[in-house]
Structures are given as structure tokens and as C-alpha cells.
């Protein structure tokens, strides 16, 4: 019961954006040219039921795999590019990582736009299928313009044009919600303003000298997102919910796609006669490294939505979302590092290649461990493991494991470690992380408060009832 005596379950908000799930929602929207967007889940009944990704989302992920492969090839070119047709091109590892991060930011933003939409709304009419097709075309356009050191200026303009198309498509969908829902006007206004700022910042970056473009792409849009989201922080009663389980699952799938780029990198070189033992050993250790990173990630994710960081606070929610942005360049660096080491398995290893791989592994493990602490303590992991401990000594041990890979390039610089030895050491470090996760669980699974006890939900439903 709300403060003015109106039951939360009888609030008029249900009439405007009815809460439906699964087949009922699809059955209502299966036919027709256009239907107003429907809210998939509401505050008054926000228990997260299974909401599997749609076929469109899976196809969009397939296109994102192509983008990740293209990004990996781009970064590799900045370390070892050689083409007689472009003799003036000089590889630059530092600029390569900077440009990679900027393009990862743009791809992450358009992916997040689609994930945010499917986690809150559902549409299966002809118009929204056309929007989905347009989003896919724009993503392919962005991928095609990821430069490999050739015609950088022209490719940058094409990349931003495709990015603008993707954001414009998302904005049209949000404007539909703005026009058809009084309740969602505030949120859609904030997000539309955010989209305008992002597109403006990217075009301003194009107008800058090339050495400043990608640095501007990284910092300016993030500032714009933080500024616009500040309005949401001070308007709790005007928020609209996301489907936490679906949102979390989509981020887990993003992690798997990025890890997949590393697996594909292990198939980059043919087996050379006389090197079969070392080649197969490298493949086995590389797969072990990637699989253990995957195990650590999903061991750090709660099985129930009420323990998730998205349910704890605004700060933990932001860390979960922006943490996955950092996973993007980190895991691509892991994949490219494995590819370069494999291609030079019998050659002399240089420190820059080792630094890239080791920094990628360190950043990945560090993000996983920090993300674990953003969730509510005492959760059961998605892998069915024991409840997880946030004990201080365990936290320090995890931090030490995350930092250890940074010492490996020192041995490379001293010509002590070969490519095979580097991968073996990193696989051993990641195995130590998996073992620590396995043995550090303790205690019983904690109980979480019900929806009716949540002050944020109470404030939202009270405001909705007063409308």
C-alpha cells in the first residue's frame, strides 16, 4: 500500500505500460505494422523470470563477432604491419591501443543501446524489425571502416557515419516511447539528449587532427554519459526498470563473444612440420588460459538477480556496466597477444608483444575480481559454486593474482621466457585464480529483502499512484 492509500498493484502505471512476459507478450505483438513499445517488467512485480535473448539479438551478436575480429586484425597491424603497397605506414603500438579503445567504445555504446532496449521493452511488429535490420546494417558499416592503416581519414568518416546511423535508429525507437508514454518521457528525454551528445562529440573528433581524434572519442562521450545520467540519479521516481536477469545474461554473452576472439586467434597459424609439439602445447595452454578467464568471470556472477550489482546501488550498477566496456579492449588485447606469440613461436620474443598480452590478462582478472565485490556478498555463482566470500585476505590474494602477469615481460626483456613459457605462466596464474575462487566460498547463502521492503520501489510506486 502506498503512502496515499493506493495499492501499488493497482497503480495506473499498469494501464499505460502493461507488464507482460514471454509468449503472452509475443502473442500480443506478433502481427501489425506498428505497435507502441511495451514494458517487459515493472517495479510492482519485478521478480526476474527467464527472458532468453531473441533471434535478432543472437544475430546482432554474430555481427559483433565480425567486428571483434576486425579490431583484432587492426591491433595486430599496429605491431607487425608490413605491406609493400603502403611503404609509408609506420606501426605504432601505443596509438594502436588508443584507437582500439576508441572504436571499442563506439561499438560498446551501440551494443548497449540495443541491450538496454530489449531489457526494458519488447516489440515484434514490422516497424521494429525494420529498425533491427537498420541497426545490423550500421554495425556492419562500422566494422567495414575499422582502418588497417590505410586511408585513415576516409575510414574514420565512414565509421562515424555508420555510428550516427546506429544511434539515430536507437533514437527513433526511444522517441516512440517518449510520444506514447507519459511515464517514460523523462527517461527518454535524458537518453535522447545523451545520444545527441555522443554523435556530436564523435563528429567534433573527426574535425580534430588525427592524433587527437581517438583520444577525444574516449573521454568526451564518457563525460557526456556521466553528465546526462546525473539527472536520473536525482529522479528515482521517474526511472523505469530493466530486466536484470536478461541484462546480466546479455553481458555474459558479450564476455563470451570477446573470449571467442581469443580462441579464433589460436587458429591463425598453420602447423609447421618440425614444430608440432610446441604448436600443440601452445594451443593447449592458450585454450586453458581463455577457459580459465571465462570460469573466473562466471564464478564471479550471482545466480539470483537480487544479489546482482544492478540491484544494489547506482554506483555498483554503473561499475558493472562500464566494467564490461573495459573488458572490450582487454580481451581483444589477449586475443591479439596470443596470435602474435603463436605466429612467432620460434622467433625471438620482444617485450611489447608480451606487454600487450600480459596487460590484457591483468586487466581482465582485475575487473573480474572487482566486479565480484560489486555484487551482494554471500551469493551462489552462476556455475553452481559455493557462496562467495569477500574476506579481506581473499581480496588481497585475488589482487595479487591479478598483478602477477605484469612481471612476466621482465623475463621476456631479459630473454629468459619464450612465447610458450609466457603462455604457460599466464595459464598457471589464471588457474590459481580459479582454485582460489573454488576454495574461498564459505557460509550459507544470504537472504535478500523482498520487493515490498525496497525503499526505491516504494518511492517509485508512490509517485506512480499519485499521477
Image (tube, rainbow, N blue to C red):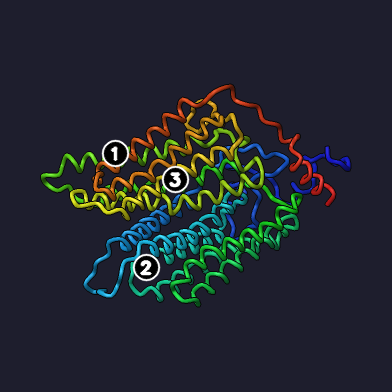
Q: Is residue 86 left or right of residue 111?
A: left
Which one is in front in this view, the residue at disc 3 or the one at disc 2?
Answer: 3
Q: Is residue 114 left or right of residue 99?
A: right
| Crowding at mark 2 (Cα within 10 Å: few <14, some 14-19, many 20+) | many
User: What residue sits right under mark 3 in the picture?
Assistant: 364
The picture places residue 256, in percent across and down from the top left corner, at 42, 45
Residue at the outermost right position: 4
Q: What numbered label is drawn on residue 466? A: none
- Quarter of the image where one finds residue 280: top left
Q: Quadrant for the N terminus, please.
A: top right
For the residue pair 426 and 290, the one nearer the viewer reads as 426
User: What residue sits right under mark 2 in the picture?
Assistant: 147
Residue at the outermost top position: 443
Q: Regarding mark 1 in the picture, which secondary structure is present there?
A: helix
Q: Regarding mark 3 in the picture, which secondary structure is present there?
A: helix
Q: Report how far apart the C-alphas of labels 2 and 1 lie in the structure.
A: 33 Å
Amino acid at each position: 500500500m502506498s503512502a496515499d492509500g493506493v495499492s501499488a498493484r493497482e497503480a495506473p502505471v499498469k494501464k499505460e505500460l502493461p507488464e507482460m512476459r514471454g509468449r503472452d507478450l509475443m502473442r500480443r505483438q506478433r502481427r501489425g505494422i506498428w505497435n507502441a513499445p511495451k514494458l517487459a517488467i515493472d517495479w510492482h512485480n519485478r521478480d526476474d523470470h527467464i527472458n532468453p535473448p531473441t533471434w535478432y539479438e543472437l544475430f546482432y551478436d554474430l555481427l559483433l563477432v565480425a567486428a571483434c575480429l576486425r579490431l583484432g586484425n587492426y591491433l595486430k597491424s599496429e605491431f607487425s604491419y608490413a605491406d609493400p603497397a603502403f611503404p609509408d605506414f609506420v606501426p605504432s603500438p601505443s596509438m594502436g591501443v588508443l584507437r582500439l579503445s576508441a572504436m571499442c567504445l563506439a561499438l560498446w555504446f551501440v551494443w548497449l543501446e540495443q541491450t538496454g532496449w530489449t531489457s526494458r521493452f519488447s516489440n515484434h511488429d514490422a516497424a521494429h524489425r525494420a529498425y533491427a535490420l537498420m541497426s545490423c546494417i550500421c554495425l556492419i558499416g562500422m566494422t567495414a571502416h575499422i582502418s588497417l592503416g590505410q586511408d585513415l581519414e576516409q575510414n574514420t568518416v565512414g565509421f562515424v557515419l555508420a555510428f550516427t546511423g546506429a544511434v539515430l535508429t536507437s533514437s527513433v525507437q526511444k522517441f516512440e516511447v517518449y510520444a506514447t508514454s507519459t511515464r517514460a518521457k523523462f527517461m527518454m528525454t535524458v537518453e535522447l539528449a545523451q545520444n545527441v551528445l555522443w554523435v556530436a562529440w564523435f563528429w567534433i573528433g573527426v574535425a580534430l587532427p588525427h592524433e587527437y581524434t581517438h583520444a577525444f572519442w574516449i573521454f568526451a562521450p564518457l563525460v557526456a554519459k556521466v553528465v546526462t545520467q546525473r539527472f536520473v540519479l536525482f529522479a528515482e521516481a521517474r526511472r523505469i526498470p530493466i530486466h536484470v536477469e536478461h541484462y546480466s545474461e546479455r553481458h555474459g554473452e558479450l564476455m563470451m563473444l570477446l573470449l571467442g576472439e581469443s580462441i579464433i586467434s589460436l587458429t591463425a597459424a598453420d602447423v609447421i612440420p618440425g614444430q608440432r609439439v610446441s604448436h600443440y602445447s601452445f594451443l593447449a595452454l592458450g585454450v586453458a588460459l581463455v577457459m580459465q578467464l571465462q570460469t573466473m568471470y562466471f564464478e564471479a556472477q550471482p545466480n539470483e538477480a537480487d544479489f546482482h550489482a544492478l540491484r544494489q546501488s547506482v554506483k555498483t550498477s554503473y561499475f558493472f556496466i562500464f566494467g564490461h566496456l573495459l573488458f572490450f579492449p582487454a580481451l581483444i588485447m589477449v586475443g591479439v597477444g596470443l596470435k602474435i606469440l603463436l605466429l612467432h613461436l620460434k622467433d625471438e620474443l620482444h617485450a611489447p608483444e608480451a606487454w600487450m598480452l600480459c596487460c590484457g590478462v591483468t586487466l581482465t582478472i582485475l575487473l573480474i575480481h572487482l566486479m565480484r565485490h560489486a555484487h551482494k556478498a554471500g551469493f551462489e555463482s552462476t556455475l553452481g559454486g559455493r557462496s562467495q566470500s569477500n574476506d579481506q585476505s581473499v581480496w588481497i590474494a585475488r589482487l595479487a593474482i591479478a598483478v602477477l602477469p605484469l612481471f612476466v615481460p621482465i623475463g621476456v626483456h631479459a630473454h629468459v621466457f619464450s612465447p610458450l613459457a609466457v603462455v604457460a605462466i599466464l595459464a598457471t596464474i589464471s588457474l590459481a585464480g580459479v582454485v582460489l575462487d573454488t576454495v574461498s566460498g564459505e557460509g550459507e547463502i544470504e537472504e535478500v529483502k523482498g520487493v515490498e521492503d525496497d525503499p526505491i520501489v516504494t518511492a517509485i510506486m508512490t509517485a506512480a499512484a499519485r499521477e
